[in-house]
Amino acid sequence: MSRRENFLPNRAFADARDGQAAAEFCEFLPGVSAAASTTFRSVLTVASDDGHALDDSEPPAFFRDLNLDQVVASITSGKQEYNLAPFFHYSLKTVEAVEYRQDVMRDLKDPRRLEAVEAFAKDLRSVRERIAQAAKFHYKLQGLAWSLDAIEVYGAAAKQLLSSLLAAPPRSAGLSGFLGYLDAYVGSPAFQKMTADATALKASLASIRYRLTVGLGFITVSAYSGEPDYGAEIQAAFGKFSQGTAADHAFKFNEYPQMNHIEAGILNRVALLFPDIFVELEDFVTRNAGFLDPTVSRFDREVQFYVAYLAHTRRFIEAGLPFCFPTLSAESKEERVSRCYDLALAQKIVDAKQETVANDYFLNGSERIIIVSGPNQGGKTTFARTFGQLHHLAALGCPVPAESARLFLFDRMFTHFEKEEDMHNLRGKLYDDLTRLRQTLSDATSNSIFVLNEIFNSTSLEDAIFLSTKVLTSIVALDALCVCVTFIDELASLSPTTVSMASNVKPDNLAQRTFKITRRPPDGLAYALSVAEKYRLTYRQLAERLSR
């Protein structure tokens, strides 16, 4: 028995006459049952998924607030043909679905599998280009030839991908399931006949020989009858006069793919000389017009979700920043994260070759709400964005920007960041804030996540304390997770479920931020310092003004 037969005889699925036989074959394919290999449909969703149409996903409302729109734009840059953005919009709802993707991502961290997938993507791109070009040609026979090329490249690409994955067997249910499907597909009679016919047709076309007689204003195309190659005779006759390497005067064909009318006329007459081959070519292309297998095509697109994300993380890892596969729970709301950072901001910092500041946080027992206080420009909003980014990326099944992470799998995420007042609705900013928050609290559940950034800044301190307390009390009642950035220190002791974290400054220079957010009681200076900065009354600002 060959190595391939010993590892993966799933081709027998196509011929197996009973379920027992197929089940026996499956023992050679880790993580895949007989049913899974024959019903495989996606490397992004598990069979038990709710069937949500990923292509219909719109950017969530929180995307812009968390700068995830920038992250996704960077990840998908250069891969517009795959329309990957919707895959990054829809967060998964079960731990099973998340782990399904995590396992595929782990598989593709192996360079052998990643190279196999990338080579397949390159070939499929070439296939699509040939199909598109064939449809544009003015001359029918040229279009048929390009269609034949597309089918030949596709067949070779599918075989090569199968061979490469067999040489580096995947462990994940997603890739193993696809491998089982691909093996059965490549071994199917229909695929075998299509590729064999394509090879035979190419050989038949390559075997055609004809003669051109070029005269003044005419070209005659006739059958080749064994006439001598006059070009070779002339070269031989004049070869003895050669005194060194001669200049190349060979005719250079135009690289533009469209034939001109003379070339097309010659080809049409060649087709008249060999009608059987060209009739067979047209029949073959027509018969295999839908040669792209839907599942294989879907894999080609979906796997780019993983390829694009891994490529995006590589630049950060090379800069010394960590990524990890988080542990998720749909029940426990205890969280622990080390060395996490804002992925959108890190991209700019890495490009500028500066150091990215990472932070830690944890929630134990009944702790649910993190109150973040401290001076302006100290990293509070960045920390809040990081919190939201971590949870969304984790719910996509992706590695997250942290050294380690244990996170809660949420159902919905709500953000409330300051928005400019709309001068046209005549309602005022405070009214709009209250309306948005009321709708948010109405839609949320105990499994939701809130990211609130400096709410009620448009009102007085007394009103801000009153309204913020009302909002946070409602979140406490929900038992939902929340990060709230605020200048109001009193909120840190609102409930046993709240914990205080604060941004830090250098002890010897209170105006210099460290951008580290640590778990500690508020220092009571945040609001006063922000007001002083707003009115340019800090020591540094006063000193600058007095020194002029």
Image: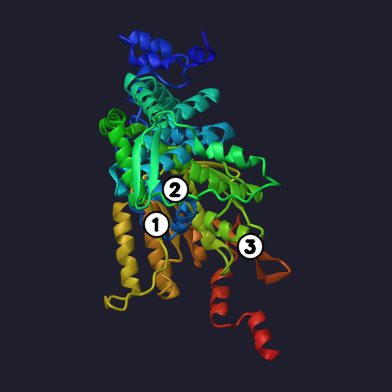
Q: Which residue is mark 2?
A: 392
Q: Is residue 95 above or below residue 396?
A: above
Q: Is residue 534 left or right of residue 182?
A: right
Graded by Cα atoms within 10 Å as few (under 14), some (14 to 19) or many (20 or more), the crowding at tag 3 reads few
Graded by Cα atoms within 10 Å as few (under 14), some (14 to 19) or many (20 or more), the crowding at tag 1 reads many
Mark 2 touches mark 1? (CB < 8 Å): yes
Amino acid found under the numbered disc labelled 2: His
SS class, disc 2? helix
Q: Which residue is mark 1?
A: 62
Amino acid found under the numbered disc labelled 1: Phe
Q: Which corner quadrant of the image does residue 191 belong to?
A: top left
Q: Is residue 354 above or below residue 110?
A: below
Q: Earlier in the sequence, mark 1 or mark 3?
A: 1
Colour mode? rainbow
SS class, disc 3? loop
Q: Is residue 521 left or right of residue 244?
A: left
Q: At which x and y percent is residue 280?
A: 28, 29
